């Protein structure tokens, strides 16, 4: 019994002292996408641990709401329908599932660089209009100031998904350093990029 217990304690000690492997460029992008686009609390905590500081000053849902609605203290019909659009945008962002598909190294003399390719699932608005030309999605009328927002909500709810591909650049100085995103768009640009409604 004692030798087995001693072996188990030694195994725990060696595991605890073992250094956690540095994330790959693909893993680094996936973590940040989960944090930035999906509001994943676990991913946020891991990003905060890596950076050593809080990464968000407000709830993810509130950040999305501010991007969509803005600072609108007035509680009127337009603000209420805007907040519904915000909820639909948040739901659509959670469903984008942007994940890396591979990376290409382009190291320099004093900097390691990785170009990470990714794929996201985004709303296919063209398919909505093809399937439902007469009902559900209509052109906004001049007399209805909220029709455009209601149209956006309907399209976000009904649109099937299509694949969107892109790439971002990550860099680090040495093998033991964390990969840092160099050109990751902020949240409002991701909303425009991934969920932009057709003109």
Image: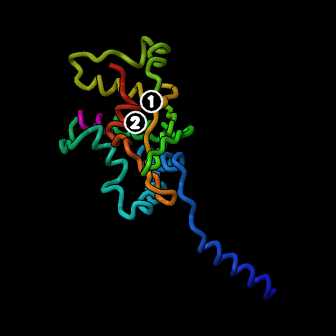
Mark 1 and mark 2 residues within 8 Å of each other at the beta carbon: yes
Give the answer, above or below, for where 104 lies relative to 46. above
Give 49 or 85, whichever is nearer the viewer.
49
Residue position marked by numbered label 2 in the rendering: 88
How is the rendered protein coloured?
Answer: rainbow
Residue position marked by numbered label 1 in the rendering: 157
Left or right? Give the position of 164 relative to 80: right
Give 103 or 94, whichever is nearer the viewer.
103
Q: Quadrant of residue 69?
A: top left
Residue 119: x percent and y percent?
52, 34
Q: Label 1: few (<14), some or many (≥20) within 10 Å?
A: some
Residue 76: x percent and y percent?
21, 37
Q: Residue at x 38, y 36 (%)?
A: 89
| Outermost right residue | 1
Q: Is residue 108 magenta?
A: no
Distance, label 1 to label 2, CA atoms, is 7 Å
Q: Label 2: few (<14), some or many (≥20) within 10 Å?
A: some
Q: Residue at x 44, y 15 (%)?
A: 129
Magenta span of residues? 78-83
Q: Earlier in the sequence, mark 1 or mark 2?
A: 2
Give 52 or 124, whichever is nearer the viewer.
52
Image quarter where the C terminus lies is top left
Does the image show residue 182? yes
| Outermost bottom residue | 2
Q: Which label number is shown at residue 56?
A: none
Does the image show residue 34? no
Residue 31: x percent and y percent?
49, 50
């Amino acid at each position: 019994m004692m030798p087995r217990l001693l072996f188990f304690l030694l195994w725990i000690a060696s595991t605890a002292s073992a250094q956690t492997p540095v994330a790959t460029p693909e893993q680094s992008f996936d973590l940040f996408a989960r944090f930035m686009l999906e509001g994943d609390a676990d991913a946020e905590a891991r990003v905060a641990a890596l950076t050593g500081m809080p990464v968000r000053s407000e709830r993810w849902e509130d950040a999305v709401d501010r991007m969509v609605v803005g600072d609108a203290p007035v509680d009127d019909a337009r603000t209420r329908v805007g907040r519904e659009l915000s909820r639909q945008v948040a739901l659509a962002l959670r469903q984008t599932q942007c994940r890396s598909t591979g990376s290409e190294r382009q190291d320099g003399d004093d900097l390691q660089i990785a170009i990470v390719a990714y794929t996201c699932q985004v709303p296919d608005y063209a398919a909505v209009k093809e399937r439902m030309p007469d009902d559900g999605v209509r052109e906004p009328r001049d007399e209805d100031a909220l029709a455009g927002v209601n149209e956006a909500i309907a399209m976000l709810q009904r649109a099937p998904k299509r694949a969107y591909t892109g790439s971002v650049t990550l860099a680090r100085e040495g093998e033991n350093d964390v990969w840092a995103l160099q050109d990751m768009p902020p949240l409002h640009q991701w909303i425009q990029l991934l969920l932009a409604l057709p003109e």
